[in-house]
Image (cartoon, rainbow, N blue to C red):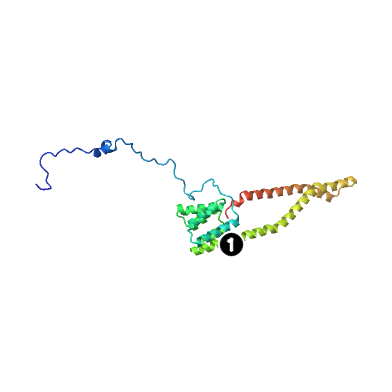
Amino acid sequence: MSQFEFPAGPLPAVAPQQADIAPVFGVAPPETRGHRKQKPAKEPKYAPPTPVGEKKKLITVVGKKARLDDVAETLEDLASMLEAGESEERALTELGKQYSKFNIGGAYTRAAARMRDQGATFIDAMCAEEDAVPRVARELIRASATPRDLQANLRNAAMIVVEATDIKALIRSSLFKPILLLAMVLAFLIVAGEFLLPQVGSMFENIGADTPEATTIMIGVGSSMKWVILGLVAVILLWTIYWFAFGRRVPR
């Protein structure tokens, strides 16, 4: 009989194994009986959080607004860390921790998260922070072609920011005396229109003479000028409050 031929007659019955019929009839194999059935892991009820920078939140909690001197200092520190061989993502992370109380620290933290989670480049991650990073710094970072250019541009941006701060301080000091003089003149006009000019009119009435037409006009103008000056002061005060509350947050 060849090895490819089968013997005549019925084949011997072979008992099926319990493990073979278990998937068909739902019978657990003997070695697994008595053990608790493992339940499949459930899918999370909520979707994972949106990666940082992918979708802007409706409410963003930021730290205290950093002064331009602090921003320039962070740019200098960033350039020094990159020159020392530190990676860009780690340098941003360290600066974010160091300046965590300021909005510039939050900007560095978000930029590092973009590089780590989304694979963004250093230039794209930094230029996306328009609220905290000054415009001149973003433009110089975007213009960097090599790592050496990036380090030099960071230092140049820090220097320009410091110079801008000095110019603003000089302008404020130069305008202090004219503003003080203008305030004194406005105060004198209010006092004159409220107290001095009416007394001039009463003086003519006491001596029984008619009040000159020019004096009458001055009294009328002085009484109305008081409200004009108070309205102007109120507008300046409201504009100042708006500027410090909302206007300074506009990206530059």
In the figure, 21 relative to 54: above or below?
above
In the figure, 17 relative to 182: above or below?
above
Residue 144 at what x, y percent from top left?
51, 62
Asked if residue 145 shows in the view, the reply is no
Going 73% across and 54% down the picture, which residue do you hit? 180
Query: Type of residue at label 1?
Result: Met
Q: Residues within 10 Å of mark 1 (few under 14, many from 20)?
A: some
Q: Nearer the viewer, residue 242 or 91?
A: 91
Going 74% across and 52% down the picture, which residue do you hit? 183
Residue 9 at what x, y percent from top left?
10, 39
In the figure, 112 relative to 19: above or below?
below
Going 59% across and 61% down the picture, which residue do you hit? 160
Residue 112 at what x, y percent from top left?
49, 54
Is 12 on the left-hand or right-hand side of 236?
left
Is 229 on the left-hand or right-hand side of 37?
right
Location of the C terminus (image quadrant): bottom right
Q: Which residue is mark 1?
A: 159
Q: Nearer the viewer, residue 192 or 56?
A: 56
Q: Secondary structure at mark 1?
A: helix
